[in-house]
Image: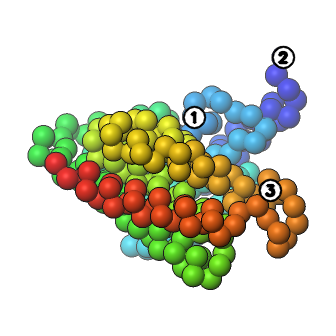
């Protein structure tokens, strides 16, 4: 038996999606709409939202166009929105594993002004595939470097929980970058760095397993304050935790940059 809240949420998402698609289809600058994620997979529960990719003729920056369209739509349910120009869309479906596998591969086209835009892209040549894998690794490792820098800034200001959180993020993104670099796959949807490391050659990070296990435990509590026991300012994360996390993150980022080379 399906719970009533799940049925109510599914009905709300259905109705809101219909309204949104009708609104978008009436705009001359919109070329297409794709729904992806849990809704497209038919896995709706009471916490489900809508994940939409919209193709729009626009010169606005990526985040500006998302904000503009979000304000214009005034969504009545939680909506995660991605907005691409036609050229970005064509490039992404050839070069971006997440786009190829999750948005196009598992999503559903709800409306298209020119359906041919959704045709499968031609296969990559071996040279193109290698270049794409390098570019996607660079996307991940750049974010990892930024997280490492944020961890270091937090350390300098004695903000231990943020030093731990951003160190975990730097490690996670470095490992995902290596996975993408080796296989041209969408990075796994997990934050467990022990699991991510297990997908790579054993000798790359086997000496850091104890640190990875410890740092795994920082992810949820450093994001959700109510997951931690105690009251401010006496919380469990301390200077020693932050020191271990940053030291490990530096090692992982450096190794990722080294191991990414052919």
Mark 3–mark 2 distance (CA, rounded to whole Å)? 35 Å
Give the structural element (helix, strand or loop) at label 3: loop
Q: Residue at x 79, y 38 (%)?
A: 46
Q: Earlier in the sequence, mark 1 or mark 3?
A: 1
Quarter of the image with the N terminus in it: top right
The tag on residue 228 is 3
Measured as percent of width and height from the top left, residue 226 is found at 83, 57
Q: Residue at x 26, y 51 (%)?
A: 259
Q: State yes or no: discs 3 and 2 in contact (Cβ < 8 Å).
A: no
The tag on residue 40 is 1
Is residue 69 at least partly visible in the picture? no
Q: Residue at x 37, y 65 (%)?
A: 142
Residue tagged by mark 2?
Answer: 1
Which residue reaches farthest bottom? Answer: 157
The tag on residue 204 is none
User: Which is more foreground, mark 3 or mark 2?
Assistant: 3
Up-down relation of residue 203 to residue 28 (above or below): above
Give the structural element (helix, strand or loop) at label 2: loop
Measured as percent of width and height from the top left, residue 170 is found at 47, 60
Measured as percent of width and height from the top left, residue 201 is found at 32, 37
Q: Is residue 222 left or right of residue 165?
A: right
User: Which is more foreground, mark 1 or mark 2?
Assistant: 2
Q: Is residue 159 left or right of residue 224?
A: left
Up-down relation of residue 109 to residue 172 (above or below): above
Q: State yes or no: discs 1 and 3 in contact (Cβ < 8 Å).
A: no
Query: Label 3 neighbourhood size at 10 Å, few (<14), some (14-19), many (20+)?
Result: some
Measured as percent of width and height from the top left, residue 249 is found at 46, 60
Depth check: give the residue in front, 75 or 21. Answer: 75
């Amino acid at each position: 038996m399906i719970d009533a809240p799940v049925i109510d949420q599914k009905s709300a998402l259905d109705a809101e999606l219909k309204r949104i698609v009708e609104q978008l289809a009436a705009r001359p600058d919109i070329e297409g709409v794709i729904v992806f994620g849990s809704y497209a997979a038919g896995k709706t529960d009471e916490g489900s939202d809508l994940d939409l990719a919209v193709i729009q003729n626009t010169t606005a920056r990526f985040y500006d166009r998302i904000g503009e369209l979000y304000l214009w739509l005034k969504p009545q349910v939680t909506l995660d929105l991605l907005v691409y120009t036609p050229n970005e869309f064509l490039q992404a479906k050839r070069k971006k594993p997440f786009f190829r596998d999750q948005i196009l591969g598992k999503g559903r086209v709800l409306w298209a002004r020119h359906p041919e835009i959704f045709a499968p892209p031609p296969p990559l040549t071996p040279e193109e595939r290698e270049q794409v894998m390098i570019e996607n690794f660079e996307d991940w490792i750049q974010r990892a470097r930024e997280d490492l820098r944020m961890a270091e800034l937090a350390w300098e200001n004695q903000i231990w929980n943020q030093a731990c959180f951003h160190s975990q993020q730097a490690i996670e993104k470095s490992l995902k970058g290596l996975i993408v670099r080796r296989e041209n796959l969408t990075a796994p949807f997990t934050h467990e760095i022990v699991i991510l490391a297990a997908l790579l050659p054993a000798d790359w990070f086997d000496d850091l397993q104890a640190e990875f296990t410890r740092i795994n435990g920082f992810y949820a509590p450093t994001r959700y304050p109510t997951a931690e026991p105690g009251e401010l300012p006496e919380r469990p994360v301390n200077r020693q935790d932050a020191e271990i996390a940053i030291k490990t993150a530096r090692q992982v980022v450096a190794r990722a940059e080294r191991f990414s080379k052919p």
